[in-house]
Amino acid sequence: MYKRILVPLDGSELAEKAIEQATHLCAEVGEIILLQVIRMPLPVMTPDIGMTMPIIHRDDMVEEAMAYLNDWVDILAEQGYEASAAVVEGDNVADAIVAYAKNNEIGLIIKSTHGRGGLSRLVFGSVAEAVLRQAPCPVMFIRSDDTD
């Protein structure tokens, strides 16, 4: 059905629920691409120390993300699916997902969402909503079962 399905992951169980849907929709000739967007930490201002940068190296972040995604690629390969992993860096997660989809001929994006509304969505923002508005292809959302 779809030749290239993009599944953005952030390491959470909620995000991983989208993988199952991707396997159901992926044709035998299709590919599932697992994507993780990494963001470099912002400087932190503390009263006692002043401005400081958290000591996190970009290469370590990329390596950790690739290891996580490649574990899933291996699981999918064992189940007979063609899968690959990609890590991109971006300050805005939604923009990074959309840019990847545009640049890689993605046919469908499957993403999980908390389904927040009201004040919660205002405070936390909505990556899902931004992806939906900007995506160059159809988007399927897997909603959280949480009722919080």
Image (spheres, rainbow, N blue to C red):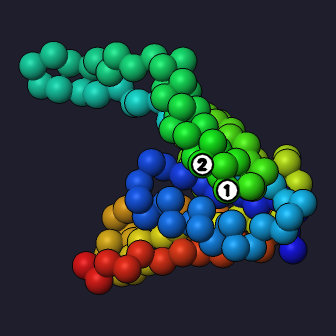
Q: Is residue 129 visible?
A: no
Total numbered badges shown on the rendered structure: 2
- From this view, report whether residue 72 is shown above or below residue 124: above
Q: Quadrant of residue 14?
A: bottom left
- From this view, report whether residue 80 is shown above or below residue 84: below
**Picture coordinates of residue 67 (x, y %)?**
54, 31
Where's the C terminus, which quadrant? bottom left
**Picture coordinates of residue 106 (x, y %)?**
83, 58
The local crowd at label 2, few if under 14, some if 14 to 19, many if 20 or more residues have their Cα within 10 Å, is few
Element type at mark 1: loop
- From this view, report whether residue 45 is shown above or below residue 132: above
| Residue 49, label in figure | none
- From this view, report whether residue 58 is shown above or below residue 4: above
Q: Are marks 1 and 2 in contact (CB under 8 Å)?
A: yes
Q: Residue at x 84, y 68 (%)?
A: 27
**Picture coordinates of residue 19 (x, y %)?**
60, 62
Q: Quadrant of residue 5?
A: bottom right
Query: To which residue does mark 2 refer?
Result: 75
**Picture coordinates of residue 84 (x, y %)?**
73, 43
Q: Residue at x 27, y 19 (%)?
A: 51
Q: Please, what is the three-letter code of the amino acid marked with disc 2? A: Ile
Q: Is residue 6 visible?
A: yes
Query: To which residue does mark 1 refer?
Result: 79
Q: Please, what is the three-letter code of the amino acid marked with disc 1? A: Gln
Where's the N terminus, which quadrant? bottom right
Q: Residue at x 20, y 18 (%)?
A: 50
